Image: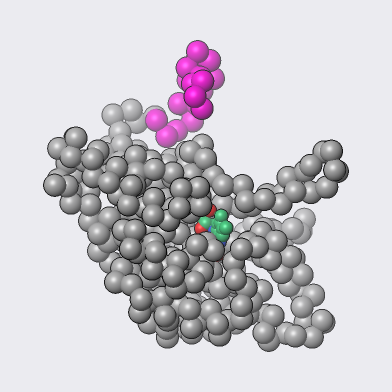
Amino acid sequence: MADLKTTYMGYELKNPIIAGASSLTSNVSGVKKAAESGAGAVVISSLFEEQIQAESFLLEEGMHQYDNLNAEMTTLFPDVDHGGPEKHLILVKEAKKAVDVPVFASLNAVTREAWITYASLLEDTGVDGLELNFYSTPLSFSERGESIEKELIETLKAVKKTVSIPISVKLSPFYTNPFNLIKQIDDVGVNGYVLFNRFFQPDIDIDKETNVLQHNLSTWNDAKLPLRYAGMLYNKIQGDVCSSSGILSGRDAVKMVLAGASCVQVVSTLFRNKVSYISEMVKEIETWMDGKGYKSIRDFRGHLSEENNPDPWVYKRAQYVRLLLKPDWISREG
Ligand SMILES: Cc1cc2nc3c(=O)[nH]c(=O)nc-3n(C[C@H](O)[C@H](O)[C@H](O)COP(=O)(O)O)c2cc1C
């Protein structure tokens, strides 16, 4: 039978399916459920700056600086239990003790001080690694991309100096040149990349003329960008790539590994199909590997990366031009 073991952030995972950060992993029973369903690892929902500041800046004045973040957090992740940081640290500690697969904590801070303090406190819980969730939506017309990236790198260096557990970064694709940023991060040294985070965007109800806020769960189309990056980054950086966004089935996970990812994180598919669906996904990978005669993940990982692809142009612009010039290639299934 196929061996699904893979490595991520220095750990051996029994399979490449990781339950990503969400309200499904914001309590101990959710983390246990993911592990019991066969997840190779679990990421606990993020500790957000808003939770931290709510504790230390109870005065109205102090909160203004975080208005944007506060509104974004509480509306975008309404199901996440926004308890204080103390409560979150206890959750991480208990979740780590409750399961025997690697457990990663996730942090989304804003101030340098909060990044450092809470990275350290999260490490103290005994968790196996730290996912730095660089979720931010710049709103200022004057802030330069360069300064946002510089701040990210300086934060990363400061966190790295503070903790000794493995670190991953979860990025959005909205940087001018993600490859350049990833290279800068790789030079600092991280153990993993979660590519990519997915931003929640507001919708509009035209009959009521109001904004609509709902969980817009992902579809396979959302996975095509992560697929491309997995393919292009294979063998080019030190950290492991963990693909994320739009991975809905075990067969989708296989595509990411063929492109070069070490593992995948899933959330939307677990909302749609329940957390227990992880076991189906694992079975699907196993069935595919058995059908192909692959004994281990190593046997096929990166086979369709940019480096190993029989078509060297597949991830590049030339492919795009080819498609534009041959519209009959357009797939009706999307
Ligand atoms: C309800 C909900 C809560 C989420 N909470 C977090 C979170 O706390 N931290 C985080 O980094 N991402 C969070 N995410 C984003 C997911 O971890 C993931 O990056 C995104 O949903 C894309 O993966 P998917 O296509 O498998 O859903 C959340 C997503 C959802 C739907």
The percent coordinates of residue 103 (x first, y second) are: 38, 70
Nearer the observer, 172 or 121: 121
Left or right: where 142 falls relative to 97: right
Depth check, front residue: 253 or 249:
249
Q: Which residues are magenta?
A: 314-334
Horizontal placement of 190 versus 295: left or right? Answer: right
- Residue 141 pos. (x, y %): 77, 55
Asked if 193 appears above or below 126 in the picture, the reply is above
Q: For the point 42% across and 85% down, which residue is it?
A: 124
Name which residue lies at 39% across and 54% down.
276
* Residue at 53 percent of width and 15 percent of height: 327
Q: Position of residue 162 (x, y in %)?
A: 45, 83
161 on left or right of 16: right
Is 160 included in the stretch rendered in magenta? no
Would you place residue 326 above or below residue 186 in this image? Answer: above
Can residue 32 be seen in the rendering of this structure? yes
Determine if residue 242 is in view.
Answer: no
Rendered position, 14 above or below 300: below
Colouring rule applied to residues: one colour
Residue 145 x/y as whole percent? 64, 56
Query: In the image, is residue 324 part of the stretch drawn in magenta?
Result: yes
Q: Quadrant of residue 172?
A: bottom right
Looking at this view, is 328 or 42 the one in front? 42
Question: Across the whole image, how many numbered discs are drawn on residues?
Answer: 0
Quarter where residue 207 is shown: top right
Q: 309 above or below 257?
A: above
> Which residue lies at the image location 19% right of the left edge and 35% below the top edge?
291
